[in-house]
Amino acid sequence: MTPGESSRYDVVVFDVGGTLLGFHDQAPFQAFLAGAGLPATADDARALHARLSAVIRQERNKAQGLGARGQELSDWWRGLFRLTWPDRPDLADEMLRWLFDGRFDQLYDDVKPTLAGLQALGLRLGVISNFGTHLPGVLANFQLDGYFDFVIVSAAVGVAKPDPRIFHMAVDASGRPPEGLLYVGDHVGDDVEGARAAGVDAVLIDRGDRQPGALCPRIGSLAELVRYVQVPRQPARAIILDMDGVVLDSMPHHLASWQEALAPLGIALGAEDLYPLEGVPTVRTAQIFTERFLGQACSEEDARRLAAAKQAAFRRAFVPRLVPGMGPLIHDLAGRGFVMGLVTGSSRSVVEENVTPAGVAGLFQAVVSGDEVARGKPDPEPYLRAASRLGVEPGECLVVENAPLGIQAARAAGMACAGLATTLPAERLAATGADPVFGTTADLRGWLLARWRGD
């Protein structure tokens, strides 16, 4: 297949640590403990793994830009291991030897199927990594070397991410212009911002959903990448709308309801706290706010109690109404033959209580609510489920979203996504992957009808 026919890009370039390889398997840690003559049960291995993982999360940003000289990375890792073993520097040094021997590295399960899937689309593949000069051998040990047309290692070229020069090297190696490349990595600073500074698109791989506030396109697993790179078909057959902030003019009322529910805890919530989390299930949102503002974990029971208080406040205050101009637009699109879908992180009961009175429920051929999916936004599941119910392929859908998590979900589903800036600045929606972004429903309508139906 010729590159460009089915993909937005010609070349996909990968980071290594946290993207292709990780420390997710505890077996090597158990082997390390046994070799050191220490207790080496599965629980001991889990404890060591958890301790090291916590140190890495704490110290990760201190590694930004390191790697132009191999010794920099060695010193950084040695420091991590000494924080992990503060009373046993000998064990810290032994862990460093294991690291550079590759004995802690494990290949993520989604790597080889994804690389093969991208190659089947006709894409070329490459690597940019802040790594030691032994990286080619590490890739060969995992039988990955055959997938890549080029491998650029910071310690070998004397330049490290996020310096745009290392991304320019990838552009030169690929023989394609910067806009023909996509970079995939797990760190916003080193990977996403570095690539963007070189004019290269980037997507964040966020395994474990640890960076929900990242202002960039985001996927939860590499398995989502094959859909992500594919070109949506023109014209769209289906229009899928988010509910809160796109169809319903409800976000200020959600904010007021959260403020009422959280006030007894002494939490003063602002729009800047809530709006970026739109799409997160209500119970999880309660946990996030409790942990963020009170610095303590929130049990499932307490979170459900807060969520119920919030929902009760919302029901008391909100009179269902549409975003200005959205009612005529939905009627117009349905009348022109588009199949219409509605996707929301809210429950089915909330949809029925608010969309039906607003007078547009009958125009949606598919509705996907938060209680119908195992994984909500930013996972692509809600939008993929909507496409399936509408009987269309993901590439035949256009999504309209007003929030970063929804944009990330739509893009990860392989769908085109336009932004509607009803709650957050247009620049923030664009940074997350919406293209284009509109300030009013009237502007959105004009673009939709002109671009997607030649009107």
Image (tube, helix red, strand yellow):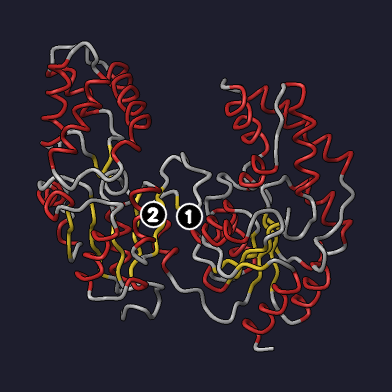
Number of marks: 2
Q: Residue 391: percent from the left, percent from the top?
A: 61, 69
Q: Residues within 10 Å of mark 2 (few under 14, many from 20)?
A: many
Above-or-below relation of 242 to 6? above
Q: Quadrant of residue 267?
A: top right
Callout 2: SS: helix
Q: Which of 15 and 374 is in front in this view?
A: 15
- Tags 1 and 2 in contact by the CB under 8 Å rule? yes
Name the residue beneath numbered marker 1.
Answer: 216
Assign the N terminus to one quadrant of the image: bottom left
Q: Which of 288 and 302 is in front in this view?
A: 288
Above-or-below relation of 453 to 140? below
Looking at the rendered structure, the kind of residue marked 1 is Cys
Q: Give the side of residue 55 with respect to residue 344, left or right.
A: left
Q: Which residue lies furthest to the bottom in this view?
A: 454
Above-or-below relation of 289 to 333? above
Q: Give the side of residue 211 with respect to residue 384, left or right.
A: left
Q: Residue 163 carries which label?
A: none
Q: Residue 112: percent from the left, percent from the top?
A: 27, 55
* Mark 1 / mark 2, whichever is N-terminal: 2
Callout 1: SS: loop
Q: Residue 422: percent from the left, percent from the top?
A: 72, 58
Above-or-below relation of 349 to 303? below
Q: In which quarter of the image is residue 282?
A: top right
Name the residue beneath numbered marker 2.
Answer: 192
Q: Give the side of residue 280 with respect to residue 50, left or right.
A: right
- The residue lying at 15 percent from left, 57 percent from top is 145
Q: Distance between the residues labelled 1 and 2?
A: 8 Å
Looking at the rendered structure, the kind of residue marked 2 is Val
Assign the C terminus to one quadrant of the image: bottom right
Q: Residue 292: percent from the left, percent from the top?
A: 58, 29
